[in-house]
Image (cartoon, rainbow, N blue to C red):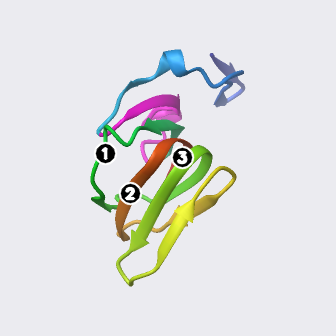
């Protein structure tokens, strides 16, 4: 639901709902804020859900916008270009600068909350 107030607009989602997933580049997404909402093309947020079956092998990912993630459930391993490796599990959070070279491994079915800016 989107409700305007004065010159500002805001969106409220009262619950995470897996029934609202839609296909994404890999896995599925439930948007909280789609790219371009509120005349802000560089800001978006949502829930990303991916299974090991959808990503059976590690995949390289160039971070195309500043991105912050919070793991709700599951397990991801993220390797950075410099050799550092991080295991992200429920409660973990990470933030990446635009241009970061990463390699992601979906260890367990994962749901994350993300913000692109």
Q: Point out the residue furthest to the bottom here.
A: 82
| Crowding near the residue tagged with mark 1, few <14, some 14–19, many ≥20 C-alpha atoms within 10 Å | some
Q: Please, is residue 90 above or below residue 3 in the view?
A: below
Q: Residue at x 56, y 45 (%)?
A: 74
Label located before the other in sequence (3 or 1): 1
Label 2 vs label 3, nearer the camera: 2
Q: How far apart are the two marked residues, 2 and 1, measured between alpha carbons?
A: 8 Å
Residue 61 in the image: above or below residue 100: above
Residue linked to disc 2: 105
**Whole-number angstrom distance, CA of label 2 to CA of label 3:** 17 Å
Residue that appears at 31% across and 38% down: 54
Label drawn at residue 55: 1
Q: Tell whether label 1 touches label 2 (CB within 8 Å).
A: yes
Q: Answer with left or right where residue 14 lies relative to residue 103.
A: right
Span of residues in magenta: 26-42
Mark 3 and 1 residues: CB-CB less than 8 Å, in contact?
no
Q: Residue 31 lies in magenta, yes or no? A: yes
Quadrant of the drawing holding the N terminus:
top right
Q: Report which residue position mark 3 lands on.
A: 114
Q: Secondary structure at mark 1?
A: loop
The crowding category of the residue bearing disc 2, from other C-alpha atoms within 10 Å (few below 14, some 14 to 19, many at least 20), is some
Nearest to viewer (mark 3 / mark 1) = 1
Local secondary structure at mark 3: strand
Find out whether residue 64 is within the magenta segment: no
Q: Disc 3 versus disc 1: distance between alpha carbons?
A: 18 Å
Element class at badge 2: strand
Q: Which residue is rendered at x = 44% and y = 64% of the image?
A: 78
Residue 44 percent coordinates (x, y)? 49, 41
């Amino acid at each position: 639901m989107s409700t305007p107030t004065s010159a500002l607009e805001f969106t409220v989602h009262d619950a995470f709902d897996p029934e609202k997933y839609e296909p994404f580049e890999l896995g599925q997404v439930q948007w909280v804020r789609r790219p371009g909402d509120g005349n802000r093309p560089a800001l978006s947020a949502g829930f990303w859900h991916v299974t090991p079956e959808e990503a059976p092998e590690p995949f390289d990912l160039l971070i195309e916008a500043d991105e912050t993630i919070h793991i709700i459930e599951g397990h991801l391993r993220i390797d950075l270009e410099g050799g550092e490796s991080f295991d992200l599990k429920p409660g973990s959070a990470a933030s990446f600068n635009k241009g970061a070279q990463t390699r992601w491994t979906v260890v367990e079915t994962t749901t994350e909350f993300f913000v692109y800016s």
